[in-house]
Image (cartoon, grey):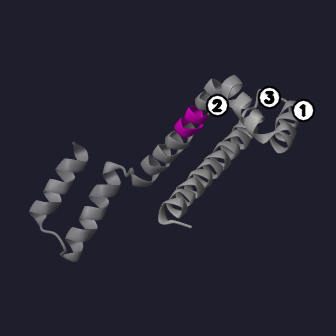
Amino acid sequence: MSFWESFWDIIWWFFWVFVFVSYLMVLFNIIADLFRDHALNGWAKAAWIIFLIFVPFLTALIYLIARGRGMGERAAADYRRQQDAADSYIRSVAASSPTDEIDKAAKLRAAGTITDEEFAAIKARALA
């Protein structure tokens, strides 16, 4: 076997690995979308899963053509919902009232960690 034959065999093998991994990603996205879609009833979801098992490539192609737009919209809505939840959590954890900040600064001033000028600056920033 010559170098070029083995080289093209390796390229061909990488191509098929790429196709297989791409198919798996599409398959998992389709299954996730099926369970994310609350408008689709259980029988329709079961039918899609059965067809994905027995006629995988054709079913995946038909699903992407027929339901691709809705799939994108559901994924975007899910992403927005997750982002809003993360933002609200961060706001709830990070937000402190001006009273809390002034109280913390007063404790630091009483402990001698900050000066009166630094306390006044923190107080002015908290009240602004």
Mark 3, other Cα within 10 Å: few <14 / some 14–19 / many ≥20: few
Amino acid type assigned to the residue bearing label 1 in the image: Trp
In the image, which is nearer the foreground, mark 3 or mark 2?
Answer: 2
Q: Earlier in the sequence, mark 2 or mark 1?
A: 1
Q: Position of residue 57 (x, y in %)?
A: 74, 39
- Say above or below: 93 vs 66: below
Q: Position of residue 54 (x, y in %)?
A: 86, 42
Task: Compare residues 86 and 93 and report the one nearer the observer.
Answer: 86
In the picture, measured across the screen, residue 4 lies left or right of residue 19, that is left
Task: Compare residues 62 and 121 and report the one nearer the observer.
Answer: 62
Amino acid type assigned to the residue bearing label 2 in the image: Met
Distance, label 1 to label 3, CA atoms, is: 8 Å
- The segment highlighted magenta reads 75-80
- Identify which residue is drawn at 55% across, 33% down: 76
Distance, label 3 to label 2, CA atoms, is: 12 Å
Q: Position of residue 77 (x, y in %)?
A: 58, 32
In the image, which disc is placed on residue 95?
A: none
Mark 2, other Cα within 10 Å: few <14 / some 14–19 / many ≥20: many
Q: Earlier in the sequence, mark 3 or mark 2?
A: 3
The answer to which quarter of the image holds residue 55 is top right
In the image, which disc is placed on residue 43?
A: 1
Q: Quadrant of the C terminus?
A: top left
Amino acid type assigned to the residue bearing label 3 in the image: Leu
In the picture, measured across the screen, residue 59 lies left or right of residue 96, that is right
Q: Which residue is mark 3?
A: 40
The verdict on residue 78 being magenta is yes
- Identify which residue is drawn at 13% across, 62% down: 118
Q: Quadrant of the N terminus?
A: bottom right
Task: Compare residues 18 and 108 and report the one nearer the observer.
Answer: 18
Q: Position of residue 29 (x, y in %)?
A: 66, 42
